[in-house]
Image (tube, rainbow, N blue to C red):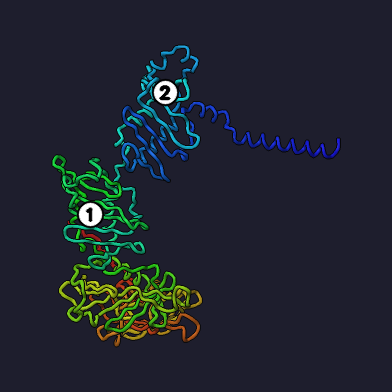
């Protein structure tokens, strides 16, 4: 055998092996083949593009375009996609209970008539590549819940369950979609509402809604979404007529009002017109939905959208802050200018050489302002700012993004995106104005108490962050004198200045509090009422080997809310400490003598 014959045989064997492998891979196994043989229909539902149902005199023609279904005969309207999906599921899971062969049918010519399959009144035809022949539905079988069916191109009769028959034994209008529209809430980008009071227009931008007419203002996102949902979630009560005839009987020749929803790229929109209330169904109202070209009735509750006024949809939040781009907060008030700068998740005081800020307090301020709501819309045109003290605001906050370098989109530097100014206080309210809005509003004046205008008030609350063992020596000065102690080799304490037995527990408790001292809050610049010009208690300590590793804490007056004013030599301003911290810092350092037990008299005996 020469080499050419050998190569040829090898190629043939290899090809046969690959064919057998491919055939075995794609051939259903025994269980799968048995399951497929038991089914009435085998089809790919993704390739189904049409369903035709003949139910007596009613012919129902359903067609799919993309992922949407339409009823084309006898009515041209939107079809109920969920109902069709359920029908296809029933067809996919439809199984044979028994089969009467064509040979048996041929043996008795009257069998098809007996089974109701000669001229059946109900038929179903699927359209699309690889779909089976038309299905003919006959009479009920003797078995409960069973019936006879056959394919048009076959005389073989199948006994099957009645599930599919029940799914298609409907009137044409039963296949119409009772949802008013297939437009989803998230797809709506613009709304035009016409009511007896006038016209409103709303538009969505960057996930937020704005009112464009009759005034330009921020809209309340949840309220606008609720308004849209009343249309997108509406369910049709009755299919009344097409809209090509006289609309006067329905009050739709001159409707009470309308709402038009626009998708993202939809310039025409879908308009819902609201008309009169039917004489017999007082809980319903006639409507016309132009995108479907029909008159329907909806629950009367839909009329509530015609009562909407611009103020009903306005965003009552004082200011909208985009925290995703927020890098700077500038506060201008009676005590100067404060600039807070974000560093990752933390904040610093840029106007104080980037000293660490109380980041939790900054976040609280942002959240407070985001949640703050106006109590009243005072003026829609801010033409008289001096009247409200807004020509020279008492307090003004500006929110900015910050770019350290030039890019294709932005230039380096600070870019303000929102600002709010506060003017005169009027009773419980304070007048305010957001910079890019022409309105004057009122909000609760207590909000001003939550905005620190002194840069010192924004300092971080942690005063010291030492390990207790770092503190080697301290000196306490009070009105009664001075005491000084130092650690020994065993980490105990001994007097440098002072006398008496040392209460080691109290000393260690004081040192632990001192090493991790925190402020409850900062009061701001030191004033006479803080009592720190003549402190009642001063403690100086060393926390390192050098003289520069030292600090001093002064304790002053008690505040009205039970705290104590305090100051440190390396930080400007006054802060408050809690009463427990004050007690720990001022514990007595000398051990009190233990009282000696007194003799107990013996009981006397009475003769």
Q: Nearer the viewer, residue 111 or 346?
A: 111
In the structure shown, which secondary structural element does the residue marked by tag 2 occupy? strand
**Would you identify the image quadrant in which residue 177 lies?**
top left
Work out which quarter of the rendered image holds the C terminus and state it: bottom left
Q: Nearer the viewer, residue 141 or 130?
A: 130
| Residue 517 visible in the shown view | no
The residue lying at 44 percent from left, 25 percent from top is 152
**Would you identify the image quadrant in which residue 557 lies?**
bottom left
Which residue is labeled 2 in the image? 149
- Residue 290 position, x and y percent, is 27, 50
- Residue 528 position, x and y percent, is 26, 86
The residue lying at 29 percent from left, 69 percent from top is 319
Residue density around tag 2, few if under 14, some if 14–19, many if 20 or more, within 10 Å: many
Residue 10 lies left or right of residue 99; in this view the side is right
Residue density around tag 1, few if under 14, some if 14–19, many if 20 or more, within 10 Å: many
In the structure shown, which secondary structural element does the residue marked by tag 1 occupy? strand
Position above or below: 272 against 559: above
- Residue 171 position, x and y percent, is 30, 33
Residue 159 lies left or right of residue 481; in this view the side is right
| Residue 271 visible in the shown view | yes
Which residue is labeled 1 in the image? 258
- Residue 437 position, x and y percent, is 27, 72
């Amino acid at each position: 055998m020469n080499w050419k014959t050998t190569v040829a045989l090898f190629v043939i064997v290899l090809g046969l092996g690959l064919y057998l492998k491919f055939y075995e891979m794609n051939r259903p196994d025994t269980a799968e083949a048995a399951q497929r043989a038991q089914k009435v229909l085998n089809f790919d539902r993704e390739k189904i593009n049409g369903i035709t149902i003949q139910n007596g005199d009613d012919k129902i023609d359903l067609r799919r375009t993309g992922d949407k279904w339409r009823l084309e005969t006898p009515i041209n309207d939107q079809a109920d996609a969920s109902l069709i999906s359920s029908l296809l599921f029933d067809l996919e899971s439809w199984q044979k209970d028994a089969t009467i062969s064509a040979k048996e049918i041929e043996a008795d010519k009257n069998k098809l008539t007996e089974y109701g399959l000669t001229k059946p009144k109900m038929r179903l035809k699927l359209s699309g590549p690889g779909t089976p022949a038309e299905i003919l539905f006959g009479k009920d079988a003797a078995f409960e819940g069973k019936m006879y069916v056959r394919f048009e191109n076959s005389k073989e009769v199948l006994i099957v369950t009645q599930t599919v028959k029940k799914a298609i034994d409907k009137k044409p209008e039963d296949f119409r979609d009772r949802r008013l529209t297939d437009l989803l809430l998230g797809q709506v980008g613009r709304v035009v509402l016409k009511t007896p009071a006038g016209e409103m227009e709303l538009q969505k931008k960057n996930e937020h809604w704005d009112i464009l007419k009759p005034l330009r203002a921020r809209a309340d996102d949840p309220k606008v979404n609720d308004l849209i949902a009343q249309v997108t979630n509406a369910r049709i009560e009755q299919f009344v007529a097409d809209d090509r005839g006289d609309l006067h009987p329905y009050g739709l020749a001159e409707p009470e009002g309308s709402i038009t929803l626009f998708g993202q790229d939809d310039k025409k929109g879908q308009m819902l017109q609201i008309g009169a209330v039917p004489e017999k169904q007082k809980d319903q109202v006639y409507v016309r939905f132009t995108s479907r070209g029909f008159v329907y009735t909806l629950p009367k509750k839909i009329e509530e959208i015609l009562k909407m006024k611009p103020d009903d949809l306005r965003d009552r939040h004082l200011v909208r802050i985009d925290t995703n781009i927020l890098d700077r907060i500038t506060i201008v008030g009676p005590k100067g200018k404060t600039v807070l700068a974000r560093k990752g998740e933390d904040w610093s005081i840029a106007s104080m050489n980037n000293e660490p800020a109380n980041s939790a307090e900054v976040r609280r301020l942002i959240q407070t302002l985001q949640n703050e709501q106006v109590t009243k819309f005072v003026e829609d045109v801010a033409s008289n700012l001096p009247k409200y003290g807004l020509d020279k605001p008492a307090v003004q906050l500006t929110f900015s993004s910050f770019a350290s370098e030039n890019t294709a989109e932005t230039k380096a530097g600070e870019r303000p995106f929102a600002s709010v100014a506060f003017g005169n206080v009027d009773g419980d309210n304070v007048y305010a104005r957001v910079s890019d809005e022409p309105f004057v509003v009122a909000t609760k004046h207590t909000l001003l108490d939550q905005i620190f205008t002194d840069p010192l008030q924004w300092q971080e609350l942690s005063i010291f962050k030492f390990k207790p063992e770092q503190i080697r020596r301290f000196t306490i000065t009070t009105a009664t004198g001075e005491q000084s102690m130092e650690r020994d080799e065993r980490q105990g304490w001994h007097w440098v200045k002072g006398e008496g037995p040392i209460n080691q527990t109290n000393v260690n408790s004081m040192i632990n509090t001192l090493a991790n001292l925190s402020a409850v809050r900062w009061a701001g610049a030191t004033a006479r009422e803080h009592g720190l010009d003549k402190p009642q208690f001063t403690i100086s300590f060393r926390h390192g080997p050098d003289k520069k590793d030292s600090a001093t804490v002064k304790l002053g007056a008690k505040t009205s809310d039970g705290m104590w004013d305090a100051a440190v030599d390396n930080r400007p301003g006054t802060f408050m400490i809690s009463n427990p911290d004050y007690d720990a810092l001022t514990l007595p350092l000398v051990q009190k003598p233990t009282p000696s037990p007194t003799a107990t008299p013996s009981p006397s005996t009475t003769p």
